């Protein structure tokens, strides 16, 4: 019997080694280890053996059985591995082929600039106010210390709809409207982005429609230095930490004193080049301390309150920031232009 | 305002200050200097010469051969093409080696066989603008005065060793429309004194001016001060070179000595003057009044102008002889024959002059000054100084006295400032003596009481009236660069977006996430596009004076200009165009009432929405692409359950592929394909568009988010396929299903639509999948079957057939 078991073992191991597929292997399992298999048969015949031989043969049969089972398992694992590898090989693709495109759109570059500025000022405690694009003469001019026949109205060539209605020439009327809303009670910190209109022929540097952001702060003890500090924060955020600002006196009827803000030229770093007209500085925006007449007209006591205001030309910022050379690009909406302004770029 | 650096030095000591330093400092303290023009930048080897002989060039009809003495041993031959060259003239010669503005290099040359040792120059060739060159030399060389020495450097002679600063003056700084004004400004900046021109005492010839002229003003408000002087026995001729040079440097063309002097004084004092020919004036009476309607005048520019009742005119009692403050009349112009001058110096109301100048489209050096204001205290000074110069340079005698009408009240202006307020306002810590030192530099007088300073504002600074004006004066002279950087220190405010603004950001993010790029188009449109695609019609709102018909009225739809953008892109082979815009439309509310401005969002989509060719996927945009994007938007805004799409006919849209969109029961927008005819008109192809009233979508209380438990029990689904008429809309069937399905029916969705084989003509098959769920327990098949049966019954009642 011993011999028989040894033979079975040899035979089975040979067959296992020879097989190359899982079905055959399973057949081998059934043939040798199944209930009707030869080893089971040997074990069944053990009753005929002498009692002292039984444990010896039993142990041997179990050993043979285990060896075969283990070999089958090893082989099965191996065959499965081979199969898997074949399958994976078959499934292999060219990862360098282009992916299925998912369309993505962008903010318009002007919106991108507006949003960046909005985020900055919200962080500084400002809210965003909006106002009508068709304004009354009162809010666009008179409430801003520009009575009829004021010579400075020359500076604002206006699209009139009627004697009294016009397309706003700046976002400043939102100042006056918001101040009225606050009923003489500060503090007030707002920025007002929006579209404005002027009677200009459209060319590379002029557009009859453009965007502005007005800023206004009113409180007790607001100082000219606060305007300077605020504009400095703005300039560094929008144009970069390495840029310097300077203020120059200027004139707007609704602020006194009025200033223009320049930033140091990025191209030449201040030494002078054609971009900055050899001055080292580029004019960016205008602002000033709110004129007491403007405060009073909108219900604020100019003895108690002071304030500052500034007006940012959004196109100008975008042109300086991104190096855009023609203002008409903003309104032609060429998709090759619009796709260039990723939300993450600075 | 053009400012000659050399001339300015007559009033202020600028030693050690280069023109560039000067420009930089003036810019930083208040007046932007646009450019510094150095006239002599490249000019050398340019000398005076004497034309000894002048004869015809043998080989060229238009050329002359000139023998010119240029102060060298031998006279030189120069070929000259100017028509006005003649023997005996003193001229400007560019010698070989000279370089002229614009880079022209002069060399010894042969012209048509004749040697030319240089060039006789015109003023333009030396860099003067043709608009300032005296008319008699406009087409030829410049002829110098007879007494000019020969062979000397012509650069200083012509005042070309100078620099000219171009000041860009803001409306408030009209005081710097004069050399004296600029001198005060410069003196303050550099802490210098101002040397004012000295007017010599001239008591006149003893005649009484009253015997020559009387003055009457009908409109004292328009001409509160009018003065006249008379100068007799003048000889009209060219001005001396120094005077002509200064005028040309300042951008004014020299005419003759008298006119040049009036212009010179205008530049020096900022006070416009006018010289009439006394003998041609037509009377001994100056009457200043408003013009009568229909009255005419020919101005000095030879234009006949019809006047209106708004125009102020100077008359001789009968007819106008000048348009007050703007331009003189041709009938009383000073000519070469003039011997007696009537010199006007007046103070006119700025807005009157502005109106006239604007109405007639006529701006002059005089009108631009009156418009912005002149110093009332210089009216007489300027006249005295001009009379004296005329006497000196045109050889006249001054009639004693000044005829005048004076109703001008000049109120002294005082501004009181307090030191602590000043420092609080500026954010500075200036000491009292620092402040008074600055006021001193401005040459304003003042009184100090404690820390209160009362400043007496001189009449030359009529722009200063309130304390803030003085704060600015002090700050700018102190230096804006020395103001510290601070941030507001008051009560904290909360920065935030409104709910509307937040939702608008979401709208952008959803649309951009779906592949649409944001566009911005013009709000002004033309008559044809106006009204197209409009959700709400409105009476047009037109501009009074549009720049062009293209941009003449306010839009009521965003789609027309977006289609223009599509057309622009398709013409450039950008075929996949996906754009959206957020902007206002304008609905008229009445003739003099602000329109209702409603924010809309619109989009245009054309081309391939999916473009993945190597896997064979090319999906062009269709109605359902756009609808899907909008459904996504509504879902993101938590509006999906309130929105329905209903087939609709809308102007300019395809009648079979357009839906209006309802928010609850109100139309909030539409979506669809552009009508083929409209596509043709815009030159675009296969465009889908939508437009929504953003304010209706976003103007509401934001809902609160509350947690709903995740389903714990399995849902059961059933499919149902129906045969219905081809025109049957899915939404109606869905409604029937929902109604019959009751509470337990959670979802209904179309999963198949089919027409063709196995379906009768005129019919279609449409299949729904339904999901049943009870949050409290597991549903049994039996319960679901019962509901399903009910749904089937209701569908059959509705007219649908079950597909077997």
Image (cartoon, grey):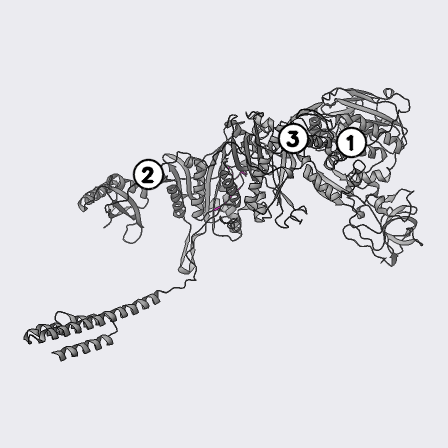
Using the image as rendered, state which of residue B380 and residue B478 is in the foreground. Answer: B478
Q: Mark 1 vs mark 3: give the one in front.
A: 3
Using the image as rendered, state which of residue B151 and residue B356 is in the foreground. Answer: B151
Quadrant, the N terminus of chain B: top right
Residue B394: give x, y in percent of width and height.
88, 33
Q: Earlier in the sequence, mark 1 or mark 3?
A: 1
* Chain of the residue where label 3 is placed in the rendered structure: B
**Part of the protein shown in magenta:** B516-530
Looking at the picture, do discs 1 and 3 lie on one chain?
yes
* Chain of the residue where label 1 is placed in the rendered structure: B
Q: Which mark is residue B706?
A: 2
- Vertical comparison of A178 with B680: above or below: above
Q: Which residue is mark 1?
A: B269
Label 3 CA crowd tier, 10 Å (few <14, some 14–19, many 20+):
some
Q: Which residue is mark 3?
A: B471
Q: How far apart, in angstroms, are the residues tagged by discs 1 and 2? A: 78 Å
């Amino acid at each position: 019997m011993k011999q028989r078991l040894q033979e079975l073992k040899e035979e089975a191991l040979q067959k296992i080694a020879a097989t190359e597929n899982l079905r055959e292997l399973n057949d081998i399992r059934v043939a040798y280890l199944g209930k009707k298999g030869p080893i089971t048969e040997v074990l069944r015949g053990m009753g005929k053996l002498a009692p002292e031989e039984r444990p010896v043969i039993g142990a041997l049969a179990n050993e043979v059985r285990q060896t075969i089972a283990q070999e089958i398992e090893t082989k099965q694992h191996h065959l499965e591995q081979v199969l898997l590898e074949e399958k994976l090989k078959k499934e292999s693709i060219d990862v360098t082929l282009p992916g299925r495109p998912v369309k993505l759109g962008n903010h318009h570059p002007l919106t991108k600039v507006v949003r960046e500025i909005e985020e900055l000022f919200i962080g500084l405690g400002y809210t965003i106010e909006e106002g009508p694009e068709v304004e009354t003469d009162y809010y666009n001019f008179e409430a801003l210390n520009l009575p009829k026949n004021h010579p400075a109205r020359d500076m604002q060539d206006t699209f009139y709809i009627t004697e009294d209605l016009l397309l706003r020439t700046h976002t400043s009327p939102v100042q006056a409207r918001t101040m009225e809303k606050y009923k003489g009670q500060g503090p007030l910190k707002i920025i007002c982005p929006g579209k404005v209109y002027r009677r200009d022929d459209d060319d590379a540097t002029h557009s009859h429609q453009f965007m502005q952001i007005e800023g206004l702060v009113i409180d007790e003890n607001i100082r000219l230095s606060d305007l300077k500090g605020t504009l400095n924060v703005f300039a560094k955020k929008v144009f970069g930490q390495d840029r310097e600002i300077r203020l120059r006196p200027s004139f707007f009827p609704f602020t006194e004193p009025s200033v223009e803000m320049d930033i140091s030229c990025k191209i030449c770093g201040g030494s002078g080049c054609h971009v900055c007209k050899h001055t080292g500085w580029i004019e960016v925006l205008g602002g000033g301390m709110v004129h007491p007449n403007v405060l009073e007209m909108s219900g604020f006591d100019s003895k108690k309150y002071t304030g500052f205001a500034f007006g940012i030309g959004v196109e100008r910022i975008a042109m300086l920031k991104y190096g855009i050379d023609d203002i008409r690009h903003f309104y032609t909406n060429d998709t090759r232009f619009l796709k260039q302004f990723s939300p993450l770029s600075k | 305002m053009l400012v000659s650096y050399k001339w300015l030095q007559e009033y202020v000591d600028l030693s050690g200050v280069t023109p560039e330093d000067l420009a930089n400092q003036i810019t930083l303290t208040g007046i932007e200097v646009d450019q510094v023009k150095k006239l002599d930048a490249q000019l050398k080897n340019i000398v005076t010469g004497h034309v000894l002989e002048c004869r015809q060039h043998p080989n060229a009809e238009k050329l002359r051969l000139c023998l010119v003495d240029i102060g060298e041993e031998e006279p030189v031959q120069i070929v000259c093409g100017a028509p006005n060259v003649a023997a005996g003239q003193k001229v400007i010669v560019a010698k070989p080696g000279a370089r002229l503005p614009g880079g022209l290099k002069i060399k010894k040359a042969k012209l048509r066989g004749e040697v030319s040792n240089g060039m006789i120059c015109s003023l333009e060739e030396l860099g003067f603008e043709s608009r300032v060159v005296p008319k008699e030399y406009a087409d030829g060389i410049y002829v110098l005065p007879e007494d000019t020495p020969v062979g000397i450097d012509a650069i200083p002679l012509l005042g070309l060793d100078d620099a000219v600063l171009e000041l860009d003056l803001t409306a408030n700084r009209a005081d710097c429309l004069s050399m004296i004004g600029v001198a005060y400004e410069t003196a303050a900046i550099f802490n210098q004194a101002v040397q004012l021109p000295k007017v010599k005492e001239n008591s006149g010839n003893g005649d009484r001016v009253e015997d020559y002229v009387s003055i009457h003003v009908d409109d004292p408000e328009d001409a509160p001060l009018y003065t006249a002087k008379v100068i007799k026995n003048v000889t009209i001729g060219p001005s001396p070179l120094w005077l002509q040079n200064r005028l040309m440097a300042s951008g004014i063309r020299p005419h003759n000595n008298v006119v040049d002097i009036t212009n010179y004084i205008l530049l020096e004092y900022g006070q416009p003057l006018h010289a009439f020919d006394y003998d041609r004036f037509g009377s001994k009476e100056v009457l200043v009044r408003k013009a009568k309607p229909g009255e005419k005048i020919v101005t000095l520019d030879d234009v006949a102008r019809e006047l209106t009742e708004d125009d102020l005119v100077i008359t001789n009692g009968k007819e106008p002889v000048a348009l007050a403050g703007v331009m003189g009349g041709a009938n009383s112009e000073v000519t070469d024959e003039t011997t007696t001058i009537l010199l006007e110096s007046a103070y006119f109301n700025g807005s009157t002059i502005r109106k006239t100048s604007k109405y007639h489209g006529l701006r002059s050096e005089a009108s631009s000054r009156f418009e912005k204001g002149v110093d009332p205290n210089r009216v007489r000074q300027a006249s005295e100084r001009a009379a004296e110069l005329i006497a000196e340079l045109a050889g006249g005698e001054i009639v004693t006295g000044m005829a005048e009408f004076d109703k001008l009240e000049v109120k002294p202006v005082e501004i009181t400032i307090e030191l602590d307020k000043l420092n609080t306002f500026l954010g500075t810590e200036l000491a009292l003596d620092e402040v008074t030192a600055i006021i001193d530099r401005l040459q304003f007088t003042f009184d100090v009481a404690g820390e209160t300073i009362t400043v007496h504002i001189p009449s030359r600074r009529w722009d200063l009236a309130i304390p803030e004006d003085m704060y600015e004066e002090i700050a700018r002279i102190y230096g804006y660069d020395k103001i510290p950087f601070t941030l507001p220190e008051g009560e904290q405010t909360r920065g935030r977006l409104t709910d509307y603004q937040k939702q608008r950001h979401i709208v952008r993010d959803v649309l951009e996430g779906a592949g649409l790029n944001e566009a911005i188009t013009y709000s002004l449109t033309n008559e044809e596009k106006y009204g197209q695609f409009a959700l709400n019609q409105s009476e047009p709102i037109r501009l009074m004076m549009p720049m062009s018909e293209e941009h003449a009225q306010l839009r009521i739809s965003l789609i027309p200009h977006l289609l223009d953008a599509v057309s622009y892109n398709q013409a450039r082979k950008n075929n996949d165009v996906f754009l959206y815009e957020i902007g206002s439309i304008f609905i008229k509310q009445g003739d003099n009432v602000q329109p209702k401005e409603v924010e809309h969002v619109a989009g245009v989509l054309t081309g391939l929405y999916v473009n993945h060719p190597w896997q064979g996927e090319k999906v062009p945009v269709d109605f359902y692409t756009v609808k899907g994007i909008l459904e996504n938007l509504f879902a993101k805004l938590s509006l999906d359950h309130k929105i329905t799409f209903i087939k609709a006919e809308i102007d300019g849209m395809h009648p079979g592929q357009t839906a209006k969109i309802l928010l609850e029961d109100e139309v909030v927008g539409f979506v669809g394909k552009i009508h083929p005819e409209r596509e043709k008109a815009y030159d675009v192809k296969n465009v889908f568009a939508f437009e929504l009233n953003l304010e209706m979508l976003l103007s509401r209380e934001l809902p609160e988010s509350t947690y709903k438990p995740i389903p714990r029990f399995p849902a059961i689904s059933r499919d149902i396929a129906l045969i219905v008429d081809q025109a049957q809309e899915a939404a109606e069937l869905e409604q029937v299903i929902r109604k019959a399905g009751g509470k337990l029916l959670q979802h209904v969705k179309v999963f198949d639509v089919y027409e063709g084989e196995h379906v009768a003509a005129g019919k279609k098959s449409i299949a729904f999948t339904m999901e049943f769920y009870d949050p409290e327990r597991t549903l049994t098949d039996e319960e679901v079957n019962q509901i399903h049966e009910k749904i089937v019954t209701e569908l059959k009642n509705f007219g649908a057939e079950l597909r077997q």
